[in-house]
Image (tube, rainbow, N blue to C red):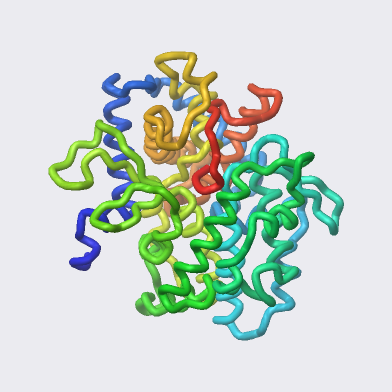
Amino acid sequence: MSRAEASPAALLLTPEAVRERAHELHALGLDHRLQHWLVQPEAMAATADLVAEVVRANYPDLTVPFHARWRHFAAGGHDRWGALRTTLPDDVAERARAAFDLVILSVLLDAGAGMAWRYRDPVTGEGHGRSEGLALASLAMFAAGTFGPGRVEAERLTDLAAADLAEGFQAGPDNPLLGLEGRATLLQRLGRTLIAAGMDRPGALFDDLAAQAVDGALPARAILVTLLHALGPIWPGRETLDGVNLGDCWRHPGIRRADGTAGLVPFHKLSQWLAYSLVEPLEEAGIRVTDLDALTGLPEYRNGGLFLDMGVLRPRDPALLQAEHDPGDLPIVEWRALTVALLDAVAPLVRARLDLTAEAFPLARVLEGGTWHAGRRIARERRADGGSPLRIRSDGTVF
């Protein structure tokens, strides 16, 4: 670890900090010392049963890809990215930069869309909501040159307006999309941040990561740490420490430290989702990504909702499920931390049921094959709209 990475702020910009502090709050929950949630580990067996069942239903041969944005581009069984790739240059590095351009943009646009919004694929005529719809809309905008010809140009992002996104997302009064202004602001900040760092496109991060590879291998944590340092300034109105924007990092009094990181709980959900999504273009470019399990599970409403709906988590006050919350509210911080720790706990239980090793079935496959889809499935069974068991206000930059 470099001296710079050992600073208090930089320590929070690591997957180790996410996992360590989430498990600290989980330990408090097991000791009945959290303010808002009771942890009921006896419900974990049934949760693992459900996840294993969903994995087998989704992937009968247990050949599960990594959890990544690329899966959403194939919604409805149509390989849209595969078709678009045939139009890209033959140069391996340039193809990787284009893939980085697309997936970085698409992941940053992948915050909660709301229950009412739908995107109609102009090619197939199919309607898609939520993550799949956001993915298809972002792919179509990329292909149409909304962000630049065959690429995403940092300069173009700086003057991107909410109206531009509304058109691409087919959003309007009859098809409302949550957090539209927030998404546009995030992309504007992305453009300015890239330019300030001397990069003309998000895809320039491929060259940064390729330069870090040793003997053709790159640790997964290096992807996340690079993203957190390079893109940190894009996150609006967040916690800072020593002048460093901490991004998806929130406060909880249960985290005790003797330095400025006391009370701070990092999650870096969108950044980790992005790190997972960069694995495939890196490997297609000949860079082997190692130690994928250094990254954590994603604390969002499908994974977190799974543990609520299965009874692993129970609110101390049932009224909590009827209220609307901001991302920094204490019940949400606790819920997200518990989700990270519980994903770590459920993974070996799922592997045991599938008779697979951690090497064959890392957390990235547990997430893709099971927990995310299991959370969606049980949400549909429990609620007519299939939404989250918790109501969270979205500004387009967290959930």
The location of residue 223, given as percent across then percent down, is: 41, 64
Q: Residue at coordinates 19% horizontally, 47% vertically from top-left?
A: 260
Q: Where is residue 375, by image quadrant?
A: top right
The location of residue 247, given as percent across then percent down, is: 39, 51
**Residue 228 visible here:** yes
Looking at the rendered structure, the number of numbered marks drawn on it comes to 0
Q: Nearer the viewer, residue 229 or 182?
A: 182
Residue found at the very far bottom of the displayed protein: 91
Above-or-below relation of 90 to 192: below
The location of residue 10, given as percent across then percent down, is: 27, 58
Q: Nearer the viewer, residue 349 or 17?
A: 17
Horizontal relation, residue 120 to residue 207: left or right = right
Above-or-below relation of 264 to 44: below
Horizontal relation, residue 368 to residue 312: left or right = right
Q: Residue at coordinates 54% horizontally, 35% vertically from top-left?
A: 393
Horizontal relation, residue 36 to residue 299: left or right = left
**Residue 286 visible here:** no
Q: Residue at coordinates 34% horizontally, 55% vertically from top-left?
A: 245
Q: Looking at the figure, which quarter contains the N terminus?
A: bottom left
